[in-house]
Image: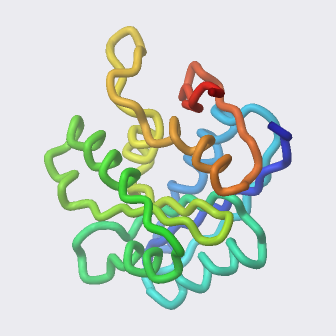
Amino acid sequence: MEKKFIKIGLISISDRASAGIYKDKGIPELEVWLKKTIKGNFQTESVVIPDDISKIKEALIDFCDVKKCSLILTTGGTGPAIRDVTPEATLSIGDKEMPGFGEQMRQISLNFVPTAILSRQVAVIRKKTLIINLPGQPKAIVETLEGVKDEQNKTKTHGIFAAVPYCLDLIGAPYIETNEDIVKSFRPKNK
């Protein structure tokens, strides 16, 4: 596989963080996690925006179509509250829904909190971009990306990032490799 530079979009969706009431913690957590997980160089684009469906759609389309991000990770706005509209915005701009990502994130989170059933994370593909809605809390972000590990740090339940590199391959996005101590990505063996 040819190795190309990947651009990753990070979008934090929060009324209070976008208004400066408190500091966003999702994007910094993702930047640290990506640096230790992805082997090789990558670039990030990031923005903090309010829980507004038109602003979320606008940011997703901009990061995909204009900034040419191959992977977009959003944080926040996926609960049942009235202002939580991230899934609706994401589904409305996607070409294909990828329901396994949301299903797996909820399954992982149920190992930690019973309220995981209230989360509505989704994932879609738009052109050659994979867009994934992550939880808003930094601890939950890492848990869903890495999965559930035992006392010896062995994976009990795979995190969603194990499937991301192969999904990117399938949609024609740049090839990425992961640090297997954090997440072992899965690619089928050549036939």
Q: Does 191 sit above or below residue 130?
A: above
Give x and y (percent) for residue 124: 49, 65
Residue, far front? 191
Name the side, left or right, on which 141 lies relative to 67: left
Q: Quadrant of residue 87?
A: bottom left
In this figure, what is the number of numbered marks?
0
Residue located 40% across and 31% down the image: 158
Give x and y (percent) for residue 51: 43, 80
Q: Does 175 sit above or below residue 178?
A: below
Give x and y (percent) for residue 132: 49, 59
Q: Does 125 sit above or below residue 30?
A: below
Residue, far top? 152
Give x and y (percent) for residue 138: 44, 48
Name the side, left or right, on which 109 lies relative to 162: left
User: What colour scheme was applied to this rendering of the protein?
Assistant: rainbow
Residue located 42% across and 15% down the image: 153
Q: Quadrant of the C terminus?
A: top right
The residue closer to the viewer here, 20 or 135, is 135
The residue closer to the viewer here, 151 or 176, is 176
Q: Quadrant of the N terminus?
A: top right
Q: Does 100 sit above or below residue 45?
A: above
Residue located 55% across and 26% down the image: 184
Name the side, left or right, on which 161 lies relative to 128: left
Residue, far bottom? 54
Residue located 52% across and 81% down the image: 93
